[in-house]
Image (cartoon, helix red, strand yellow):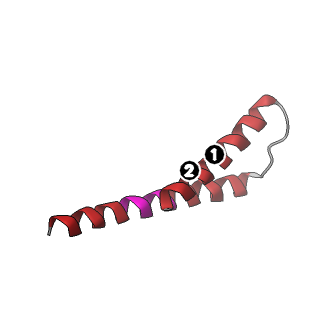
Amino acid sequence: MPYVIALVLLVMFVGNVVIGAVGQAPVVGIVAEMLILFGAAIAFSVGILRSEAREKSKQE
């Protein structure tokens, strides 16, 4: 689930950047972009840590 959240947030970020690059005003502001990217990084980190913990518990 954390990977899905990270993917959704990353798609939101990339979509906003693409819309801004095409020439229209970006949908969200700079601070919101930062928070979206930060949320994606946190969700990805949680996913990695959960996967790592799952692998350790399987090995023991």
Q: Vertical placement of 17 versus 10: above or below?
A: above
Q: Does residue 21 show up magenta in the picture?
A: no
Q: Identify the residue position indicated by label 2 in the image.
A: 7
When asked about the image quadrant of residue 56, the answer is bottom left
Q: Viewed as shown, does residue 21 lie left or right of 43?
A: right
Q: Vertical placement of 24 versus 57: above or below?
A: above
Residue furthest to the left in view is 60
Name the quadrant of the C terminus.
Answer: bottom left
The prevailing secondary structure element of the residues shown in magenta is helix
Residue visible at 49% across and 61% down in the picture: 2
Q: Mark 1: which secondary structure? A: helix
Q: Identify the residue position indicated by label 1 in the image.
A: 11
> Which contiguous range is marked in magenta?
42-49
From the top left corner, tell me how far across and down residue 20 is, in percent.
77, 37
Residue visible at 64% across and 59% down in the picture: 35
The three-letter amino acid code for the residue at tag 1 is Val
- State the residue in front, 39 or 31: 39
Q: Are marks 1 and 2 in contact (CB under 8 Å)?
A: yes
Badge 1 crowding class, 10 Å Cα cut-off, few under 14, some 14 to 19, many 20 or more, is some
From the top left corner, tell me how far across and down residue 19 is, in percent.
77, 37
Residue visible at 72% across and 51% down in the picture: 30
Q: Viewed as shown, does residue 37 lie left or right of 48?
A: right
Q: CA distance from mark 1 to mark 2?
A: 6 Å
Badge 2 crowding class, 10 Å Cα cut-off, few under 14, some 14 to 19, many 20 or more, is some
- State the residue in front, 48 or 22: 48
From the top left corner, tell me how far across and down residue 34 is, in percent.
64, 55
- State the residue in front, 53 or 22: 53
From the top left corner, tell me how far across and down residue 17 is, in percent.
70, 39
Residue visible at 80% across and 43% down in the picture: 26
The three-letter amino acid code for the residue at tag 2 is Leu
